[in-house]
């Protein structure tokens, strides 16, 4: 198999910073992604533990980010938000606000605005950062929050929540236990990449927002015979495949791989393929994903050149399936 190479994609692609879950023994950071628009890092989607360091490894400038989108407020999706905010400020962001989008709260979980306040306002967990920013940039720490209703209904439709230079973001609520959660679709130049976030298949909203998307970045794949609390939070492999088929997605990119998943990944992928006959890739940290399904290394490889992955050297966590091209 030849190495995958980035082609002409008009600069719209996603860097996977972290593709793991909460456990720390599978060589993955927790989940987080950067969406590039016209080649520039523009949107941050989730920021779990380890993603701040991955930004540095990928040579991505955090001062360039326009907005942050949080699928839900669990620690493995948000732990590095304070580190990225501080780094962006210290590296010269100035007083340009960094908009944060996320779910509204419910009786069990604070909303995004309260969560940010608890972290960054005076007296909050990281309230000292206001003084820090003033000292470094003569600016103020501005994190304007936009909360999106995450109540799942019977006939939910995607809601346009963001429009910027050449990019738009739609959101839809999904079921993730009792925690408010959202899936996002990012569109640019007629192409789109959808982030399922964490969800249980029961709501059916992921196929709705992902319909016809070029790439569906899908979180977690449980074995069909799995039991325990995770089954109320994440879909089975067959449900994942049905979602991709129902949405008619171009590429299914699996992410948010848990500690116990690697050994079970291949049989789970085969179950996915029983339901979905398109292109399937399993992401690892520090790869770029393009709308046509191309996956390339986010860092330069001295042997094969920048923007390439040699599949023979990629390791077991990057799986290429080109059956849809044959």
Image (cartoon, rainbow, N blue to C red):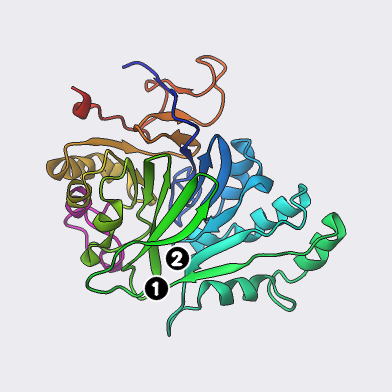
Task: Give the quarter of the figure containing the N terminus.
Answer: top left
Q: Nearer the viewer, residue 233 or 94?
A: 94
Closest to the observer: 206 or 233?
206
Position of the C terminus, as image quadrant, is top left
Q: What label does residue 179 carry, if any?
A: 1
Image coords of residue 277 (percent x, y): 16, 37
Q: Position of residue 77 (x, y in %)?
A: 49, 59
Residue extent of the magenta highlight: 221-241
Q: Position of residue 56 (x, y in %)?
A: 64, 40
Element type where label 2 sits in the image: loop
Task: Please say whether residue 73 is visible from this viewpoint.
Answer: no
**Crowd tier of the residue under label 2, counting other residues whose Cα lies within 10 Å: few below 14, some 14–19, many 20 or above:** many
Q: Residues within 10 Å of mark 1 (few under 14, many from 20)?
A: many
Residue 156: quadrant of the picture: bottom left
Q: Which label belongs to residue 104?
A: none
The reply to whether the C-beta atoms of the residues labelled 2 and 1 are less than 8 Å apart is yes
Q: Residue drawn at (37%, 29%), measured in percent from left and top?
A: 294
Q: CA distance from mark 2 to mark 1?
A: 7 Å
Asked if residue 69 can be seen in this view, the reply is: yes
Q: Which residue is mark 2?
A: 72
Considering only vertical position in the picture, is 275 above or below 206?
above
Q: From the top left corner, tell me how far across and down residue 262 is, in percent.
A: 33, 43
């Amino acid at each position: 198999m030849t190495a995958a190479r980035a082609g002409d994609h008009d600069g719209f692609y996603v860097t996977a910073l972290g593709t793991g879950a909460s456990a720390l023994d599978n060589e993955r950071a927790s989940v987080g992604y950067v969406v590039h628009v016209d080649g520039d890092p523009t949107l941050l989607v989730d920021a779990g533990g380890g993603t701040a360091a991955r930004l540095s490894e990928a040579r991505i400038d955090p001062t360039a980010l326009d907005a942050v989108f949080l699928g839900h407020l669990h620690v493995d999706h948000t732990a590095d938000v304070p580190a990225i905010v501080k780094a962006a400020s210290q590296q010269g962001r100035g007083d340009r606000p960094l908009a944060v989008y996320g779910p509204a709260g419910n009786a069990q979980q604070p909303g995004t605005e309260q969560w940010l306040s608890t972290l960054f306002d005076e007296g909050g967990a990281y309230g000292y950062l206001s003084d820090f920013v003033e000292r470094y940039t003569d600016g103020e720490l501005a994190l304007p929050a936009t909360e999106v209703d995450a109540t799942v209904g019977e006939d939910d439709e995607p809601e346009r929540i963001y429009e910027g230079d050449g990019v738009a973001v739609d959101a839809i609520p999904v079921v993730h236990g009792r925690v408010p959660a959202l899936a996002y679709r990012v569109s640019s130049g007629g192409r789109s990449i959808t982030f399922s976030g964490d969800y249980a298949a029961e709501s059916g909203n992921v196929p709705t927002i992902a319909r016809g998307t070029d790439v569906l970045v899908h979180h977690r794949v449980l074995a069909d015979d799995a039991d325990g609390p995770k089954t109320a939070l994440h879909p089975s492999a067959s449900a994942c495949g049905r979602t991709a088929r129902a949405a008619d997605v171009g590429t299914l990119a699996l992410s948010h791989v848990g500690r116990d998943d690697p050994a079970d990944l291949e049989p789970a992928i085969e179950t996915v393929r029983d339901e979905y006959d398109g292109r399937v890739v399993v992401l690892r940290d520090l790869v770029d994903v393009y709308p046509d399904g191309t996956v390339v290394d986010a860092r330069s490889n001295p042997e094969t050149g920048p923007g390439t992955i040699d599949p023979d050297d990629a390791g077991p966590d990057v799986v290429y399936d080109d059956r849809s091209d044959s």
